[in-house]
Amino acid sequence: MRQRWLPVGVLAGALFTVNVVARLVSRFAFEADTEAQDRLSLAMFAVIAVTLGVVAFFWGRHRPVDRWGGDLAVAVLGALVLTIFVGPFISGDHPFSNGAGAFFAQIWLYAGFSVGGVLIGYLVLTAMGWDHRSQSLKRYAETKLSKPRRVVRR
């Protein structure tokens, strides 16, 4: 049980750490510059998408989609909850300080970049033929072709 959920927790913690670093840099380096804060926020979402794409690429090589997809969804959901409800306290705000629109916009941005990163990572893996299903089909075809044909006498 621990072998399955430890990587999920580590991934959620890593995604939340990316958010914490972005919030702290935004708070201390660009406190007055809202344009720079927006660019930093976009960079944070891009780092999250790249991270999830890489994780989907590596997890998809050795596990079926239904297993790693659920694990990835739990990790992203955990990181999202931490980012939405705990993250603002790190930067000196509260979750609804900018209104409900900004709150839900952050949820949609996080979800969009997460799904996009996972899809790109998995599509690259599938296009290369290295995903779990392609490798299973390849092994099946090799075993079927390696057996000699049975001779049928009439």
Image (tube, helix red, strand yellow):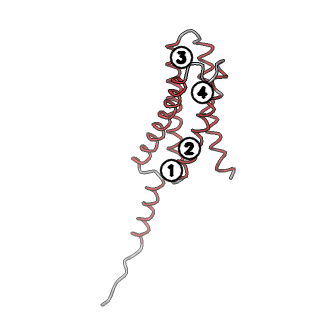
User: Is disc 4 surrounded by few (<14), some (14 to 19) or many (20+) residues within 10 Å?
Assistant: many
Of mark 4 and mark 1, the one earlier in the sequence is: 4
Give the foreground label among 4 and 1.
4
**Cβ atoms at labels 4 and 2 below 8 Å apart:** no
Of mark 4 and mark 3, the one earlier in the sequence is: 4
Q: In this picture, is 118 found above or below 35?
A: below
Q: Which residue is mark 1?
A: 61
* Mark pair 4, 2: CA separation: 17 Å
Q: In x, y percent, where is residue 147? A: 42, 73
Which secondary structure lies at badge 3? helix
Q: Which residue is mark 2?
A: 72
Which secondary structure lies at badge 4? helix
* Mark pair 2, 3: CA separation: 28 Å
Q: Which residue is mark 4?
A: 19
Which secondary structure lies at badge 2? helix
Of mark 3 and mark 1, the one earlier in the sequence is: 3
Q: Amino acid at mark 3?
A: Gln
Which secondary structure lies at badge 1? helix
Q: Residue furthest bottom?
A: 154
Q: Amino acid at mark 4?
A: Asn
Q: In x, y percent, where is residue 21? A: 62, 24
Of mark 2 and mark 3, the one earlier in the sequence is: 3
